[in-house]
Image (cartoon, helix red, strand yellow):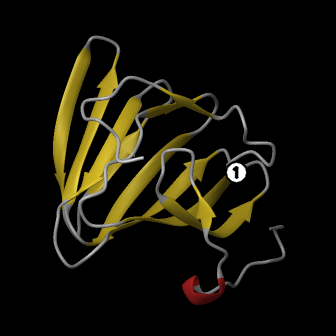
Amino acid sequence: MSDTDDTRSLAEAPRVPAPDGSTVRPLGAIAGVGSFAHFQLEPGQVSKAVSHATVQEIWYVIAGSGEMWRRHGDRSWTARLHPGVCLTIPLGTIFQFRADPGAQPLQVVAATMPPWPADSRSEARIEEGAWPPSG
C-alpha cells in the first residue's frame, strides 16, 4: 500500500494473519507517519502476547467485547473492551487480548505509528502473557 492508495473499503482489504493470531486488514498508510488497520479476533479466542520493536498503537473497539492485558515495566493491568473503548499501546508495552465467547467477533480499528514496517518479521516479538493463547 502506498500513499496514493488513499481510499479502501474494509470489504476489499486483504485478510492477513497477524503475529498475535488475530486477523488484520490493512486499510491505509502515510509513509513515515502511520498506518491504519482493522483487527478481528473470533469469539472465545485468545491472542498471543506480543511487544513491538518499533511501533506504538492506538486502538478503538468497534464491535464485540473482551479484555486487553498490558504490561509496561513493573506495572500490569487489564481493561474491558467493548464498542467505544479507546486504548493505547506505547512502545515497550507487552499486550494480549481476548474475545468474549458469544456471537460477535471482537473488532478493533487501530492507528500504528510509525507505519507497520514492510519487512515485519521481527516487529512483533512473542512474549509471556496473562492467558494461554488459543493457537
* Residue depicted at x 39% and y 55%: 59
Find the residue positioned furthest to the front.
135
Which of 35 and 82 lies nearest the eye of the viewer?
82
Which of 4 and 133 lies nearest the eye of the viewer?
133
* Residue depicted at x 34% and y 13%: 73
- In the rendering, at what x and y percent does residue 9 appear? 60, 87
Q: Which residue type does callout 1 highlight?
A: Val
Q: Secondary structure at mark 1?
A: loop
* Residue depicted at x 37% and y 44%: 88
Which of 107 and 72 lies nearest the eye of the viewer?
107
Q: Give the residue pinned by disc 1.
A: 33
Specify the quadrant of the image occupied by residue 31.
Answer: bottom right
- In the rendering, at what x and y percent does residue 77 appear? 19, 30
* Residue depicted at x 20% and y 57%: 66
Residue 35 appears left or right of 37: right
Which of 79 and 124 lies nearest the eye of the viewer?
124
Above/below status of 128 relative to 98: above
Specify the quadrant of the image occupied by residue 133.
Answer: top left
- In the rendering, at what x and y percent does residue 120 appear? 73, 42
